[in-house]
Amino acid sequence: GAGVSQSPSNKVTEKGKDVELRCDPISGHTALYWYRQSLGQGLEFLIYFQGNSAPDKSGLPSDRFSAERTGGSVSTLTIQRTQQEDSAVYLCASSNILNSPLHFGNGTRLTVT
Amino acid sequence: QKEVEQDPGPLSVPEGAIVSLNCTYSNSAFQYFMWYRQYSRKGPELLMYTYSSGNKEDGRFTAKVDKSSKYISLFIRDSQPSDSATYLCAMYSGGSNYKLTFGKGTLLTVNP
């Protein structure tokens, strides 16, 4: 079946612009995660959605970052007023039950110029 | 001290070699351990998933967990050039703690 799908695969934007990154999880997966991967920094947790529960936003680095998940499926990560330090690969992952492994998409490579 | 430590390498080996990749961690609550493989410009792909201590084997890959030493390993037998990638260890406590904590990854190159 289809894996986790992310779009766009690459995004170049100017400093100060807003960007939206999209994630389509694996069908039936109730848990959805966003991670950020910067060069030499590893994967950094951003936000977690589980079913209809309130999301865990504890990893969002600033109030310029927000995310939503509509209908328990597709998720959008929005970065407002982008800064150069936001340049990274943004990875989405989903899982189907508690304590099961995460399945990742190929990410969106964001470059802020 | 970081929660998860992983030697970033790079590690370069000849084809057919046995590769050993390792991570250490500080949080004794971690119970679920994973190894992911990540090719360039791709997302991490799950290789091995283990719970608590012990060994797990899948083809050429063996994962070992030693909770008493807070140490996990991934062994690759008969390494192939197609194994060239970054290997990430990841772990979490389980239950209400669902956030994976990752190592920074080890870059492996298998030379033909």
Image: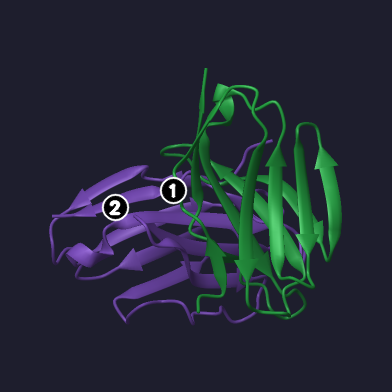
Q: Is residue A95 found left or right of B37 in the rendered image?
A: right
Quadrant of the image occupied by residue A84: bottom left
Q: Is residue A38 above or below residue B16?
A: below
Secondary element at tag 1: loop
The structure residue drawn at horizontal position 59% and vertical position 58%, both measured from the top left corner, is A73
In this view, the residue in front, A108 or B47, is B47
In this view, the residue in front, B15 or A84, is B15
Q: How many marks?
A: 2
x and y percentages locating residue A100 in the rendered image: 76, 60
How crowded is the residue under tag 2: few (<14 C-alpha within 10 Å), some, or many (20+)? many
Question: Is residue B9 in view from this perspective?
Answer: yes
Q: Amino acid at mark 2?
A: Leu
The structure residue drawn at horizontal position 50% and vertical position 72%, both measured from the top left corner, is A47
Label 1: which residue? Answer: A107
Residue most extreme to the top: B112
How crowded is the residue under tag 1: few (<14 C-alpha within 10 Å), some, or many (20+)? many
Question: Is residue A72 in view from this perspective?
Answer: no
**Chain in green colour:** B
Q: Is residue A18 found left or right of A41 in the rendered image?
A: left
State how far apart marks 1 and 2 are (Cα).
Answer: 9 Å
Say the numbered circle drawn on residue B84.
none
Q: Colour of chain A?
A: purple
Label 2: which residue? Answer: A110
x and y percentages locating residue B79 in the rendered image: 64, 28
The structure residue drawn at horizontal position 81% and vertical position 38%, both measured from the top left corner, is B58
Secondary element at tag 2: strand
x and y percentages locating residue A54 in the rendered image: 59, 82
